[in-house]
Amino acid sequence: MDWKLELMMIPVSDVDRAKAFYTEKAGFTADHDHQVSDDLRYVQLTPRGSTCSIAVGTGIVSTPPGSVQGLQMVVADIEAAHAQLAERGVEVSDVQVMDWGSFVFFSDPDGNGWAVQQLPARE
């Protein structure tokens, strides 16, 4: 049996600001935006090419905004990923090369932390 991670809840303080950041700056696709009730709004966003999405909203998670760290995406070209993020206005770190890959790091407006990795070449 396969066990697939498909959704991560990301706590944010302003849903519209988070949705704009993830779609306009980080390049995610907005899959759903449903205002279920006055206390419940659900917005699902997916990075291009990913089978795992994130959800932001109101009434969907009790952790404080900005408390999620270590989210990671993998790309084929870290330099191109860095350029795309920077061109869209994301405050992104310089490329950092390590034995286990090359990385850039950024945070959403609430401080939830992301890493983008290019895996090292396999021998």
Image (tube, helix red, strand yellow):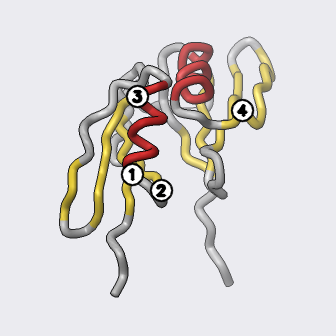
Which residue type carries mark 2?
Answer: Val
As measured in the structure, the alpha-carbon distance from the residue carrying label 3 to the one carrying label 2 is 15 Å
Q: How far, Cα to Cα, is label 4 from label 1? A: 23 Å
Q: Earlier in the sequence, mark 4 or mark 1?
A: 4
Q: Marks 4 and 1: which is nearer the front?
A: 1
**Mark in front: 3 vs 4:** 3
Q: Are marks 3 and 4 in contact (CB under 8 Å)?
A: no
Residue 33: image quadrant is top right
**What's the distance in space between the residues labelled 2 and 4, CA to CA?**
20 Å
Q: Secondary structure at mark 3?
A: helix
Rendered image: mark on residue 30: 4
Please identify, in this view, whether the residue under mark 2 or under mark 4 is nearer the observer: 2
Which dot marks residue 75?
Answer: 2
Residue 86, which numbered label? 3
Q: Is residue 59 visible?
A: no
Q: Which residue, given by chain and number where applicable, does mark 1 sit on? A: 78
For the residues marked 3 and 4, what is the alpha-carbon distance in whole angstroms? 20 Å
Kind of residue indicated by mark 1: Ile
Q: Is residue 83 left or right of residue 8?
A: left
